[in-house]
Structure formats: structure tokens, C-alpha cells
Image (cartoon, grey):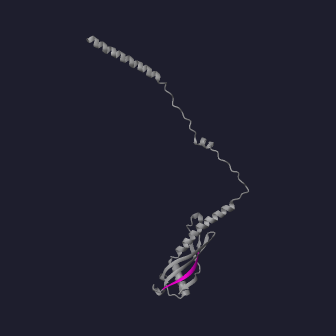
Amino acid sequence: MQKNSNASVIFTTIIATLILLLGMYVSVGLYPEAQEPQVIDVPTAAEIAALIVIPTIDSNPSLDNSKIDAIYDDIFRDENAEDVASKLALNELDNKDFKKKLANFLKENCSLEIDYKDIIEINVRDIDVNVSEETATVEVEFKVYVANYGDEDEEEKARVSVVFEVKDLEENDDYEDAEVFKTNVFELIKFYD
């Protein structure tokens, strides 16, 4: 019986080997030969740009936009210059030297005995800015409240107008050098008794 069991083992081994060899032969025949990697032709940026078609616009040589450009520049330059000039003038209202001039003006024109420290409040009523070249004239109308004789219970008020001159309104340097260089004559509009 041992021969039978050895024969069956040998027979099974031979059949398994034949199946493996047949499988290897079939599997090798199924795979195609190794292919070389494909090279994809990607266009360069210059080639893509050459494909872009930009339509041409017929230009009219008789059309002169220089005046429109000048007007546009003046409008926007003046708006920015006006803003800067008005801010500088309004900042000047809080200046100690301005308040001293205002107190002296009110002493002379309203018969008040006041010092600049007696100015309680300044309320701006109107502001008008005129820009010419790199200078501006800013007229500010305001109501000023003062404590007469240093007594806040005895409050006086007056409506006053003042003109400031602003210089160095240069747009190309973002108005860095702009400043109030002159305060013109005050004008008393009304004194409230």
C-alpha cells in the first residue's frame, strides 16, 4: 500500500508542476512587451500666448483726450486737496495761537474781557474751500462760546468768520508738506448779547 500512496503523491506532484508550467507559459504569453512611456507634448506659455487673438481697435487720430484727462485730473486732485485743506483749517481752530488771536479779536470787537482760556467751545457752521494750483483758501464760519470775565455762568457767544491760507498742496507727495501758513482777518458776523 505504500507504493500506492507514494505513487499518488508523485502523480499529484507531477500534475501540479505541469499546471504551474502551463500557467507560467500562458501568463507570459498574455502580457504584451513592455512599452516605452508616452511623451505628452505640452505647449509652452509662448505658444499659448501666440494662439490668443486680441482684436484691434481703429483709433481716430483726430480724437484728442488731453482736455478730458486734464479735467479729470483737476477734479480728483482738487477734491483731495480740498479735503486736506479743510482738515488743516479745522485743526487750526484747536491751536493755542489761533485761540489767542480769536480772544484778542473778541476783546476788540465785542467789548469782552476774556483770555484764550475762556473760550469754551467752537462750533463750525460752514466751511468753504477754494483750491488754486498748490494753495487753498479756506473760509470757516463758526460760533464761539466764551466765559466772560472768566465766569462760565456768564457765557457769551458770537458768530465769526476767518480765512486760512493753506500752501504746499502737492498731490504727487500725498500732501505731506501742506500747512496753514496764514490766518487772515477775522470777521464778526453777529454778537449775541
Q: Residue at x 68, y 60 (%)?
A: 66
The secondary structure that most of the magenta stretch takes on is strand
Q: Give the image location of residue 116, x and y in percent.
A: 49, 82
Q: Quadrant of residue 133?
A: bottom right
Circle count = 0
For this view, does 128 lie left or right of residue 64? Answer: left
What is the quadrant of residue 44 in the picture? top right
Q: What residue is drawn where x is 64% and y is 63%?
A: 72
In this rendering, the answer to whether 20 lies above or below 133 is: above
| Residue found at the far right of this picture | 62
In the current view of this chain or complex, which residue is farthest to the left? 1
Residue 169 in sight in this render: no
Question: Residue 101: x percent and y percent?
Answer: 54, 81
Please tell me whether residue 185 is drawn above or below residue 35 in the rendered image: below
Whether residue 123 is visible: yes
Give the magenta part as a residue range. 155-164
Q: Is residue 161 magenta?
A: yes
- Quick check: 78 above or below 125? above
Q: Nearer the viewer, residue 116 or 71?
A: 71
Q: Residue furthest bottom?
A: 111
Is residue 85 highlighted in magenta? no
Q: Position of residue 34 (x, y in %)?
A: 49, 26
Figure quadrant of the N terminus: top left
Q: Residue at x 63, y 65 (%)?
A: 75
Residue 3, position as x, y percentages in the image:
27, 11
Q: Is residue 114 left or right of residue 169?
A: left
